[in-house]
Amino acid sequence: MGVEIVDEAVRVAPAAPLRGLVGCYSGYRQRGVPATRHRGLPSPWLTLILTLDEPLSIASHPDPAAVPGDFPTLLGGLHTTPALIDVPGRQSGVQIALSPLGARVLLGLPAGELAGIDAHADDVLGAGVRAVHDRLREASGWGGRFRVVDDWLLGRSARGRDLSTLAVAEAWRRLLRAEGRLRVDKLAADVGFSERHLRNLFRAEIGLTPKAAGRVVRFDVTRRRLADRFRAAEPAGPDQPAPLARTPDLAALAADCGYADQSHLDREFAALASCTPSTWLAQEFRNIQSGHHPPA
């Protein structure tokens, strides 16, 4: 009797009042897929994961001093090095992408306090996480699970207060619109601050300096475009080239994303993903082909 393979991946927008504070919810459940290791890459979103049937197994944290282990719930801030997640043939949960601008409202603390770390969510947010985690696991279907998360976050937003600096919020939005390609001196001038003052505010409210935040934003845009171009080149039949032969033109990608050249792109991947663009693409393609669709 064969092993049943389950492969579910669902992504939806949050309730309307949460948009701008939350990017999306990603629900995932896999069974019977090959064991693999996933890279949790730097991105412009804080990560909150509530697992369903088994904990998240962290092999390596963005902070190398942190101890690996299993996490039934996980909350992570912005970071500039990857986490490594072991997937032993099965995983399930809901991942919530949180804007750093929503941290004070939804989490009750600035995103800067979570910079470069990930932790058990209930250690940071308290018993309310354990309660919603139980409700999530009892809910029926993805629609029911997402409603549980909506209700929980709407309740937190009603109690929370947005104490973030308006200038930081405007600077962050400008950085996102520019896909990370804004000089820090121009960004500071646009919001009426000195570079030093903006740097200090960014560290406190976002968790990274403006320069580091710009690098992460541009990297996130780049790796998404890389994946999109690879998917667009997927073979139509058995006589098409092998996966690595279809790797997109990295020099063209570097130019499109504002890197000086392909070597610059390679250095940024080495720093932020701990691998080359081709290696990341090959690993993610293998994960997808084996039925593993990791949350973004």
Image: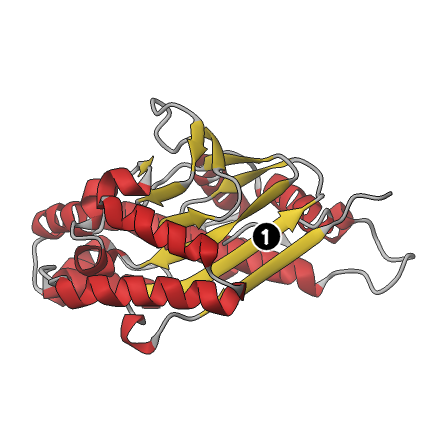
Q: Answer with left or right where residue 21 lies relative to residue 230.
A: left
**Position of the N terminus by quadrant:** top right
Give 84 or 176, whichever is nearer the viewer: 84
Residue extending farthest front:
138
Residue ID for mark 1: 29
Q: What is the number of callouts on the image?
A: 1
Residue 275 position by quadrant: top right
Give 256 or 233, whichever is nearer the viewer: 233
State whether residue 241 appears in this view. Answer: yes
Residue lying at 79% horizontally and 43% vertically, measured from the top left: 3
User: What's the image's color scheme?
Assistant: secondary structure
Give 135 or 168, whichever is nearer the viewer: 135
Q: Answer with left or right where residue 278 lies relative to residue 115.
A: right
The x, y position of residue 178, in whole percent, is 34, 65
Q: Amino acid at mark 1?
A: Arg
Residue lying at 29% horizontally and 69% vertically, measured from the top left: 20
Count residues near mark 1 (Cα–Cα under 10 Å), then give few for <14, some for 14-19, many for 20+: many
The x, y position of residue 43, in whole percent, is 40, 51
The x, y position of residue 151, in whole percent, is 31, 67
Q: Answer with left or right where residue 90 lies relative to residue 165.
A: right
The x, y position of residue 234, in whole percent, is 75, 60
Judged from the image, the secondary structure of the residue bearing numbered disc 1 is strand
Residue lying at 38% horizontally and 50% vertically, measured from the top left: 133
Give 102 or 62, whichever is nearer the viewer: 102
Q: Answer with left or right where residue 51 lies relative to residue 288.
A: left
State whether residue 209 appears in this view. Answer: no
Residue 2 position by quadrant: top right
Residue lying at 7% horizontally and 58% vertically, measured from the top left: 193
Residue extending farthest bottom:
16
**Vertical relation: 170 (above or below) 194:** below
